[in-house]
């Protein structure tokens, strides 16, 4: 029988991987074999710029900064010990969907910060805020 579902703090982390944020987690106190819908969420502040063919930012750059919430969900099955371990990857919006560049230039994600990271199990109700900001 399940009891006291919770994310294990020292086994639940976030780290930047390129422009993405990878949230690794471990949840305990679940019923063996239960199916859990888990969501990782974070806030993203990102700057996109037009870059020319020589990989240079023009002297009069066309750029934009976005501020948005990003989330990713997955289905995970608890093992016989009532634990779920896994990871979810949050991705920044594709540059081509955020910025329209002139001919000969390419929209590029140049920098960003992930913050307000959290993980939620929608079935058990477990929630954990993950401290820190993660820059790229």
Image (cartoon, helix red, strand yellow):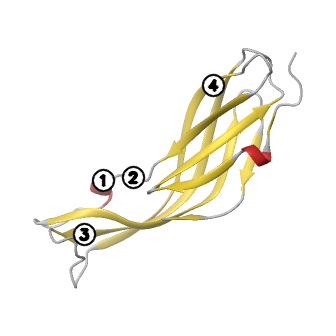
Q: Secondary structure at mark 2?
A: loop
Cβ–Cβ under 8 Å for marks 2 and 1: yes
Give how far across and how far down residue 79 sits, in percent.
72, 19
Circle 4 crowding by C-alpha within 10 Å: few under 14, some 14–19, many from 20: some
**Disc 3 packing (10 Å; few <14; some 14–19; many ≥20):** many
Image location of residue 51, percent across then percent down: 23, 70
Among the two numbered marks 1 and 4 on one chain, the one whose residue lies closer to the N terminus: 4
Q: Residue at x 80, y 20 (%)?
A: 81
Q: Residue at x 43, y 53 (%)?
A: 92
Q: Is residue 113 left or right of residue 120?
A: left
Name the mark on residue 93. 2
Q: Earlier in the sequence, mark 3 or mark 1?
A: 3
- Location of residue 54 by image quarter: bottom left
Could you classify mark 2 by the number of other residues whose Cα lies within 10 Å: few (under 14), some (14-19), or many (20 or more)?
A: some
Quick check: 1 left or right of 47?
right
Can residue 2 be seen here? The reply is: yes
Q: Which mark is residue 50?
A: 3
**Secondary structure under the numbered disc 4 in the rendered image:** strand
SS assignment at label 3: strand
Spatial separation of the CA atoms under disc 3 and disc 4: 39 Å
How far, Cα to Cα, is label 3 from label 1? 13 Å
- Nearer the observer: mark 1 or 4; the answer is 4
Circle 1 is placed at which residue position?
Answer: 97
Q: Which residue is mark 4?
A: 76
CA distance separating discs 2 and 1: 7 Å
């Amino acid at each position: 029988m399940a009891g006291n579902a919770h994310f294990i703090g020292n086994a639940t982390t976030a780290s930047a991987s390129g422009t993405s944020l990878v949230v690794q987690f471990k949840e305990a106190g679940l019923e063996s074999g239960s199916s859990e819908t888990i969501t990782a969420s974070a806030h993203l502040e990102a700057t996109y710029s037009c870059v020319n063919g020589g990989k240079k930012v023009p002297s009069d750059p066309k750029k934009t900064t976005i501020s948005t919430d990003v989330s990713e969900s997955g289905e995970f099955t608890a093992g016989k010990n009532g634990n779920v371990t896994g990871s979810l990857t949050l991705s920044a919006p594709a540059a081509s969907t955020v910025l329209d560049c002139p001919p000969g230039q390419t929209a590029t994600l140049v920098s960003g910060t992930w913050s307000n990271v959290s993980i939620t199990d929608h079935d058990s109700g477990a929630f954990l805020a993950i401290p820190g900001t993660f820059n790229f």
